Structures are given as structure tokens and as C-alpha cells.
Image (cartoon, rainbow, N blue to C red):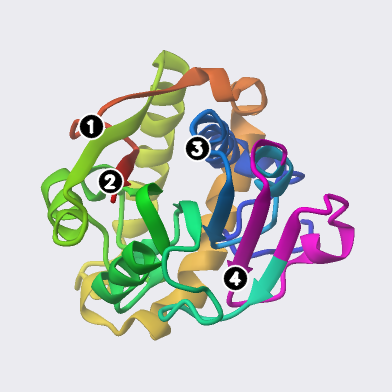
């Protein structure tokens, strides 16, 4: 078995991540259609979004709490990487950016409302916050790396406290995606049937994080081994953005200042 990497940082090279990776790419591609001017990203991650976003803006600042491996390979002159924990958004001035993008990050932030307020602070009037997060109703088990997950209504309420205009969209999949989802669901159920005391919801998050990550990685690689053609054939085009509903995998919201 190859080297383990946390399943929270989706790999573009590990085929077992393809189901999640293609969905992640879609968020960047959709955002790239809307952005211009000065753009800030919260959550560089593995850095695969840099090449998608950078060509569509004048300046692109991407931040992460860890130094991203992409930093040493950035070729675009308009890209700056900052290492910081958020909130607050240190070094970012009031009303200094036109767009903020952040995908699969806010569920990790303990002070989510404080982060939303900071994003509102740095956006210019008419600027947009383009954000994605898992839809809690489609989660198969507790993810101990997440502080919380949101329903459609909860996420809209969070953003609406600071932003007057919130468009609630979501990421859905076709039959191929749903086939993988159902196989994954059965696989997860086989694992969690041993949790007879429901410890995944009773133990502190930090106790569960490493076991969860190892089991998640093993599960993804087993699904790849048993369904190689299905997993490898999944592409970004198998996902779509549409009005948010309970069967969306991710919530994809656009909040305008």
C-alpha cells in the first residue's frame, strides 16, 4: 500500500480520491466563471485550484494554515501565498478584494461566524463570497476533522447574518456518482456496525481523527480496487451545480456584499 496522506487534503494523483477530487475541481471551475479583479482564497490545500483561478484575476492571494507544497511551484506573477490561521484575516485590509473563494474549509473553523464577518470586512461593495461545504444530510458518518457540518437552512442563516444576498446552490451527481455513493455507503456501514456504543458521536474529535483518517483511506482504496473502472471514469462533468436540495453532496453558496 502506498504512502498515506490525510483524506482531508484531496490528492490529484491518488486515484482513490478521484470521486472527491473531480467534485472539488468543479467548485474552482464554476468560481472562475464569476471572478475578476482582486481575489482571495481561504484554504490553499494541495494547491490544485491556483492554476484554475489565477488566470481570471488581476491579483490572487491564497492562504492556508500550513505551507502548501504548491508554493515552490507557483509560476504566475499575480499569485501570493500567505501562511496563517483564520480568523482573523491578518494583513488583509478593509474592502480590498473583489471576491473571496473558500472550498471545504469553513466546516473546519471553530469561529465560523467570526470568519464570515472578516470576509465581509475585506470585500468591496458588490463583492462576492463563493463558498462550498459538505451537506450534512449526505454525510455517511461523523467526520471528526470537522467542527460542524451544515444543512441548507443552517448555512444560509450563517451567511445571511452578514450578507444581504445569498444564493443557495449545491453540487449534485449523475447516476455514475450515485452508484459510487451507494457502494461507499454500504462499505461505511460495514465498518460502523462495530461501533455498537456510538462512540463516533460520543468521543472527543481529536481522539477519532487519526483512526477515522486511516479507515477512510483504506475504504477509498478498497472501493478503487473493487470498482476500478467506475472510480477512474468519474469526471468533473458527472457533477453539476443546481439549486440546493437535501441530496446535494456539497452546498455551494454565493453571498454578495
The quadrant of the rendering that contains the N terminus is: bottom right
- 227, 74: nearer the viewer: 74
Q: Which residue is mark 4?
A: 64
Q: Position of residue 237 (x, y in %)?
A: 54, 18
Whether residue 83 is visible here, answered yes or no, is yes
The secondary structure type at the circle numbered 3 is helix
Q: Residue at x 63, y 46 (%)?
A: 221
Residue count near mark 3 (Cα–Cα under 10 Å), binned few <14, some 14–19, many ≥20? many
Marks 3 and 4, how far apart in space?
18 Å
Quarter of the image holding residue 106?
bottom left
CA separation in Å, label 1 and label 4: 28 Å
Residue 180, x across and y down, in percent: 46, 29
Which circle's residue, 3 or 1, is located before the other in the chain? 3
Q: Are marks 2 and 1 in contact (CB under 8 Å)?
A: yes
Of labels 3 and 2, earlier in sequence is 3
Say whether disc 2 or disc 1 marks the residue closer to the N-terminus.
2
Q: Answer with mark 2 or mark 4, whichever residue precedes in sequence.
A: 4
Mark 2–mark 1 distance (CA, rounded to whole Å): 9 Å
Quarter occupied by residue 247 = top left
How many numbered badges does the structure rendering display? 4
Residue span colored magenta: 55-80
Which label sits in the foreground, 3 or 2?
3
Q: In front: mark 2 or mark 4?
A: 4
Q: Give the structural element (helix, strand or loop) at label 1.
A: loop
Does residue 109 appear to the left or right of 61 in the view shown? Answer: left
Whichever of labels 1 and 4 marks the residue nearer the N terminus, that label is 4
- The residue identified by callout 2 is 135
Marks 3 and 1, how far apart at CA: 14 Å
Q: Depth check: give the residue in front, 139 or 162.
A: 162
Between 67 and 217, the one nearer to me in the picture: 67
Residue 27 is tagged as 3
Q: Which residue is mark 1?
A: 244
Amino acid at each position: 500500500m502506498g504512502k498515506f496522506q490525510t483524506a482531508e487534503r484531496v490528492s490529484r494523483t491518488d486515484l482513490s480520491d478521484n470521486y472527491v477530487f473531480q467534485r472539488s475541481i468543479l467548485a474552482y471551475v464554476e468560481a472562475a466563471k464569476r471572478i475578476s479583479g482582486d481575489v482571495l482564497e481561504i484554504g490553499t490545500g494541495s494547491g490544485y485550484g491556483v492554476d484554475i483561478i489565477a488566470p481570471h484575476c488581476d491579483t490572487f492571494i491564497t492562504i492556508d494554515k500550513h505551507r502548501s507544497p504548491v508554493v515552490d511551484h507557483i509560476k504566475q506573477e499575480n499569485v501570493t501565498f500567505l501562511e496563517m490561521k483564520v480568523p482573523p484575516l491578518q494583513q488583509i485590509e478593509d474592502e480590498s478584494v473583489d471576491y473571496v473563494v473558500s472550498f471545504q474549509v469553513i466546516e473546519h473553523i471553530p469561529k465560523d461566524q467570526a470568519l464570515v464577518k472578516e470576509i465581509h470586512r475585506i470585500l468591496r461593495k458588490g463583492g462576492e463570497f463563493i463558498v462550498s461545504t459538505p451537506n450534512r444530510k449526505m454525510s455517511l458518518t461523523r467526520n471528526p476533522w470537522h467542527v460542524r457540518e451544515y444543512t441548507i437552512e443552517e448555512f444560509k442563516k450563517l451567511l445571511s447574518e452578514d450578507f444581504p444576498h445569498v444564493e443557495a446552490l449545491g453540487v449534485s451527481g449523475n447516476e455514475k456518482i450515485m452508484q459510487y455513493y451507494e457502494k461507499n455507503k454500504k462499505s461505511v456501514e460495514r465498518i460502523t456496525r462495530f461501533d455498537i456504543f456510538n462512540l463516533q458521536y460520543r468521543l472527543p474529535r481529536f481522539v477519532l481523527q487519526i483512526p477515522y483518517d486511516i479507515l477512510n483511506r483504506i475504504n477509498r482504496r478498497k472501493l478503487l480496487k473493487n470498482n476500478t473502472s467506475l472510480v477512474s471514469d468519474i469526471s468533473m462533468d458527472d457533477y453539476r451545480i443546481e439549486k440546493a436540495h437535501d441530496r446535494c453532496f456539497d452546498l455551494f453558496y454565493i453571498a454578495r456584499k
